Image (cartoon, helix red, strand yellow):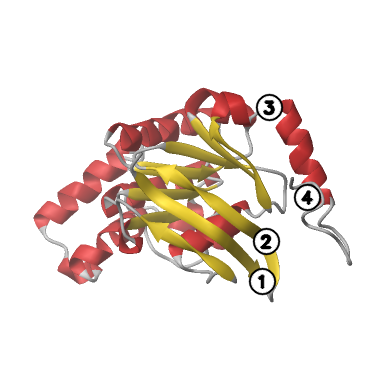
Amino acid sequence: MTYALAFEKLTLGYDSHPAVHQLDGEVADGSLTAIVGPNGAGKSTLLKGVTGVLRPLAGQVRFGTCARSDIAYLPQQSDIDRSFPITVVDLVAMGLWSEIGGLFGLRAAHRARIDDAISAVGLAGFESRIIGSLSGGQFQRALFARLLLQNAQLVLLDEPFTAIDAKTLVDLLGVVRRWHGEGRTVIAVLHDAEVVRTHFPETLMLARDLVAHGPTAKVLTAANQFRARQMCEACTGSPHDCGRYAS
């Protein structure tokens, strides 16, 4: 199996406290994978480790079919400052940064691609709107349009469907399926088990340690979810034993 990412005894954390512990495994090239687990399980931390925002405390992330420079990363909306007074078209155009280096380098062909991306996420007519005036769903659509322009082989999405309406969910899942159909590797941190079961063939379940990784039907079971909660609860307080339920 050709892999996009491989984790080798990967430990990630903050102030020397592990949030992801001794993770081993591979994410197949072109796969569509959900990362699930209880709150505090290390899901967002894992994405930050893949992007290089967070350096490993131990172990490593290895890249197979793509490079770290070929990642499109969407953090949680709560991590994004919407107060800066830029328009939708300016936000989406940032997806071309690696090609043009700045908005002043936009040519007619670039502007056509920007318009196509905005239309693809259902925001035609919103080009001149200030991003602070958008609803949560509209803003998420704009962020997906920016990702479309990045044209990356590896797409990382951190809770991309939180606080959006049903229509936006359907439309953005369509974008995810488009990426998957193009052979890109897509990894998404998700909380909605039904969305995972219906749309994501592979699942990686974390509880700081790895709980399970493989086909979603085999991973997203009641027994695994119960075990994940136990493992996270064992890591609360001090002193504690993170490995108590890991075997």
Q: Kindly state the secondary structure of the residue where label 4 is placed.
A: helix
Quarter of the image for residue 57 reads: bottom right
Work out how far the residue at label 2 is from the one at label 3, CA to CA, in angstroms. 23 Å
Q: Residue at x 82, y 43 (%)?
A: 230
Work out how far the residue at label 2 is from the one at label 4, CA to CA, in angstroms. 10 Å
Give 106 or 199, whichever is nearer the viewer. 199
Q: Amino acid at mark 3?
A: Thr
Give 4 or 137, whichever is nearer the viewer. 4
Q: Kindly state the secondary structure of the residue where label 2 is placed.
A: strand
Q: Earlier in the sequence, mark 2 or mark 4?
A: 2
Q: Amino acid at mark 4?
A: Cys
- The reply to whether residue 156 is in sight is yes
- The N terminus: image quadrant: top left
- The reply to whether residue 163 is in sight is no
Mark 2 — residue?
A: 19
Q: Amino acid at mark 1?
A: Tyr
Q: Are marks 1 and 3 in contact (CB under 8 Å)?
A: no
Mark 3 — residue?
A: 221
Q: Earlier in the sequence, mark 1 or mark 3?
A: 1
Give 60 or 177, whichever is nearer the viewer. 60
Q: Residue at x 62, y 58 (%)?
A: 22
Q: Are marks 2 and 3 in contact (CB under 8 Å)?
A: no
Q: Earlier in the sequence, mark 4 or mark 3?
A: 3
Q: Residue at x 59, y 59 (%)?
A: 45
- Whether residue 228 sits left or right of residue 52 in the image: it is right
Mark 1 — residue?
A: 14
Mark 4 — residue?
A: 232
The image shows residue 226 at horizontal and vertical percentages of 78, 35
